[in-house]
Image: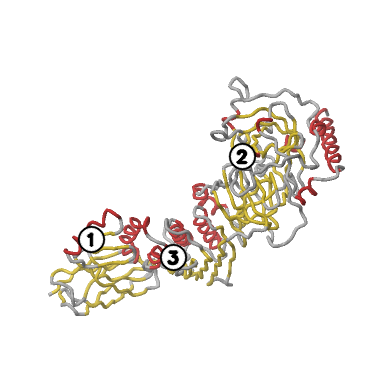
Amino acid sequence: MKFTTFALSLSLLIAQGAMSQESKPTSMSEAAVNRVRPEIMPLSDVHRGQRGVAYTVFEGTQPEPMGVEVLGVLKNFNGPKSDVVLVRLHGPKVEFSGVVAGMSGSPVYIDGKLVGALAFRIGQMSKEPIAGVTPIEEMLEINELDRTMPAAASKRALPSTQQQDEAQPASATRTSVGADAGDPLAGIAQEMQPIEAPLVFNGFSEDTLRLFGPQFKQAGVMPVMGVGGSSDPNEHTSDRLEPGSSVSAIMVQGDMSIAGTCTVTYMDDSHLLACGHPLMQFGRVEMPMTKADVVATLPSPLNAFKIINTTEQVGSFVQDRHTGIMGKFGMKPEMIPVTLSIHGGAHPKEFHYEVLNNAKLTPVAMMATVYQALQGLNEYGDEITYRVNGDINVAGFNPVRLQNMFAPSDAVQSSMLIAQSVGERFSKLFENELAEPQVDGVKLDIDLVPERKSARLETARTDVTEARPGQEITVEAVIRPYRGDPIVRQIPIKIPTSTPKGTLRILVSDGDTLDRGRKIAESQQRAKADLATTIAQLNSEHLNHDIYVSLLESNPQAMVEDKVMPALPVSVMNVMDGMRGTQDMYVSGESEVDETSTPVDFVVTGSRVLTVQVK
């Protein structure tokens, strides 16, 4: 009964404070429309015992007030010369829900002056809503934002000191604790961690997140699973964006989406600041910035978070830094449009979405989305094979081709093999040290075959044991399909007229065997390869559904960038030998003097080496 009376009294006090706030000549929403900047409270003026108010959205789009009590300042908590203000939050909603994921960035005011953003909480099992505040002075240091401070306080409708006191529970004491070594709360600093931005994966299965979660973490994204969805970013909404509003950073949008959500801390005519800590600390970024609608706030001692729907796009996030993220209003981010066309099922399916252009995150985002698109098909099964034909378009360069078959094995699903192949190409593009690729788009046509189309090379032989230069011989290869009868392929190949007398080695193999040595050479040269060379190397990879016959001589072969120089004379090799230390050249002991292939409708694995005596 006492608790009910206390909660009701507290609700009335907060409601009275909100009514008093609305009676001011300029409301928070009106100020947000005019984007009048608040006066800043320097960290040097913050001390324990002060009372204030913070704003966040618990449901819908309207920020609601929470009482704030300053407990002290944690020196160098967030790094050298990067302090954090320790506060206790008050109010029926926050005391019930605790400090939840999505609350980071909530602006904190004392005496109408902006102190900073809620950014840290104590673990996940804390019984008290104690939080850490990133000072606004440090957030204003983020690049591109006007760092000048207003000379006078704006006439913003912020609660007065009396209203802030009314937001405190009647039983709240005014004694608070600092952060000195003898303080019983000094150990809190060791328990505090950034308030997570709920990362909503819309259209993804649990299996996809389990498989790619570690790679997202490695790329800097903590996959804190929220619940929510997304609406058309081009659809205008009447919701006003203001300090305390929820805002989302989009990493993938379209038929699948990935969005991280936090709270707006500060706004001016062209920018906003949010979060109070990094999303991924990527530095310069381009991510769509959208409004967000909080469907509900889910309290949980293990993982409390806001359930979010992203809505209208209002600009682009351009900086992801140590003390927060910065967005620019009206800016259109450069995303990578992706089209996946899938055929072979009951009905053709087409997926359209966009992925952010970022060296760390784009490869794993591409992998996860391609994998999910295939896994989500009704036609999907463990024995499915895919034929893939597509391009990655890079501005100013030839497209990166992707043309292969992908059949499952007992260890790896075919959908995962496609995802890895796409991710590998993006990784190599973004790893280039000489140029930053501008990827204009990705288009993949995928044909689905409802069986395991794999085969191993079982045997190989030649029709002769001796031959002369210029003579055509036939290589016969036998492949064994998965659970099928043997298939024989005869491949004619001509011995070059320049072939010296002696033993000629003939390699009958799959494409991966031929690419293995080349990939070693490319990895050694990658630091000095330009983007055109990198793309040429990717496009020179062999198909995995062909059988290859290669003639090998015992003369050394050199590879410089994407150019192969076979059968080099000893004199030339002596001149070029000094280049090895520069990693401009890769040398192998044998030269591939000729190569031919024949297509088979199977993913082939295996190799055989034959010999012929050249007379």
Distance (Cα) linking label 3 and label 2: 50 Å
Residue 455 position, x and y percent, is 36, 67
Point out the image quarter for the N terminus: top right
Residue at the spot 32% in from the left edge and 61% down from the top edge = 518
Which residue, given by chain and number where applicable, does mark 1 sit on?
576
Which residue, given by chain and number where applicable, does mark 2 sit on?
138
Q: Do the residues labelled 2 and 1 touch (CB within 8 Å)?
A: no
Residue 595 position, x and y percent, is 28, 72
Q: What kind of element bears circle 2? A: helix
Q: In this view, does 486 lie above or below 329?
A: below
Q: Residue 439 carries which label?
A: none
Relative to 249, 165 lies left or right = right
Around disc 1, counting alpha carbons within 10 Å, would you say few (fewer than 14), some (14 to 19), or many (20 or more)?
few
Q: Nearer the viewer, mark 1 or mark 3?
A: 1
Q: Which of marks 3 and 2 is in front?
A: 2
Instruction: Give the amino acid type for the residue marked by disc 2 in the picture.
Output: Glu
Which residue, given by chain and number where applicable, does mark 3 sit on?
406
Mark with earlier residue (1, 3): 3
Relative to 346, 4 lies left or right = right
Mark with earlier residue (2, 1): 2
Residue 574 position, x and y percent, is 18, 60
Q: In this view, does 413 lie above or below 323?
A: below
Residues 379 and 71: in front is 71
Around disc 3, counting alpha carbons within 10 Å, would you say few (fewer than 14), some (14 to 19), or many (20 or more)?
many
Q: Is residue 17 above or below residue 50?
A: below
Point out the image quarter for the C terminus: bottom left
Residue 565 position, x and y percent, is 26, 67
